[in-house]
Amino acid sequence: MEMGKKKEKEGFSPLSYCGFDCSLCPIYRVTVNPHPETEDEICKRYGYNHSELICMGCHSVLVFKYCRECEIAQCAKKNNVNVCFHCKDFPCKLMKKIDDFHKK
């Protein structure tokens, strides 16, 4: 599969483990719809290499390097839920932490 030329798969769910919409993520967007100027801007702004700009969403096998380390995704997988709000412990300290971050 050629990097940057991937198509969305039938049945793709844009909802990430934490509840965000993966299809709004710039990394996901340049993966499914390559745009060199946007890729250059992302690399410059965040210090990534072009080869790192690959993600088909949290629930895929092609996950952006930052998202592979996501505590929330790891927790959801451990608890066998597709979205955190399906977890018996929701809302938990991890969700509170992300909520506090976005309130800043």
Image (tube, rainbow, N blue to C red):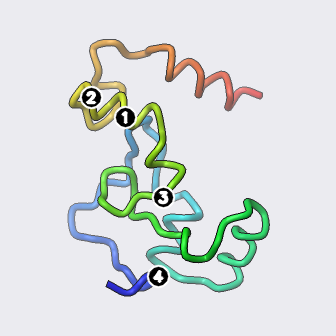
Task: Say what amino acid the circle numbered 1 marks.
Answer: Gln
Q: Nearer the viewer, mark 4 or mark 2?
A: 2
Direction from residue 31 to residue 86 in the image, left or right = left
Task: Say what amino acid the circle numbered 2 marks.
Answer: Lys
Q: Disc number at residue 78? A: 2
Measured as percent of width and height from the top left, residue 74 is found at: 37, 34
Measured as percent of width and height from the top left, residue 55 is found at: 44, 64
Task: Say what amino acid the circle numbered 4 marks.
Answer: Gly
Q: CA distance from mark 1 to mark 4?
A: 26 Å
Residue identifier under label 1:
74
Q: CA distance from mark 2 to mark 3?
A: 19 Å
Total numbered circles? 4
Q: CA distance from mark 1 to mark 2?
A: 6 Å
Place residue 5 in its image quadrant: bottom left
Q: Residue drawn at (39%, 37%), measured in percent from left and top?
A: 73
SS assignment at label 3: loop
Query: Depth check: 49 or 95 in front?
Result: 49
**Do the residues under discs 2 and 3 have CB atoms within 8 angstroms?**
no
Mark 1 or mark 4: name the one nearer the start of the chain. Answer: 4
Q: CA distance from mark 3 to mark 1?
A: 14 Å
At label 4, counting other C-alpha atoms closer than 10 Å, the crowd grade (few under 14, some 14-19, many 20 or more) is: many
Quadrant into which the N terminus falls: bottom left
Residue identifier under label 3:
64
**Do the residues under discs 4 and 2 have CB atoms within 8 angstroms?**
no
**Do the residues under discs 1 and 2 have CB atoms within 8 angstroms?**
yes
Task: Say what amino acid the circle numbered 3 marks.
Answer: Phe
At label 2, counting other C-alpha atoms closer than 10 Å, the crowd grade (few under 14, some 14-19, many 20 or more) is: few
Mark 3 or mark 4: name the one nearer the start of the chain. Answer: 4
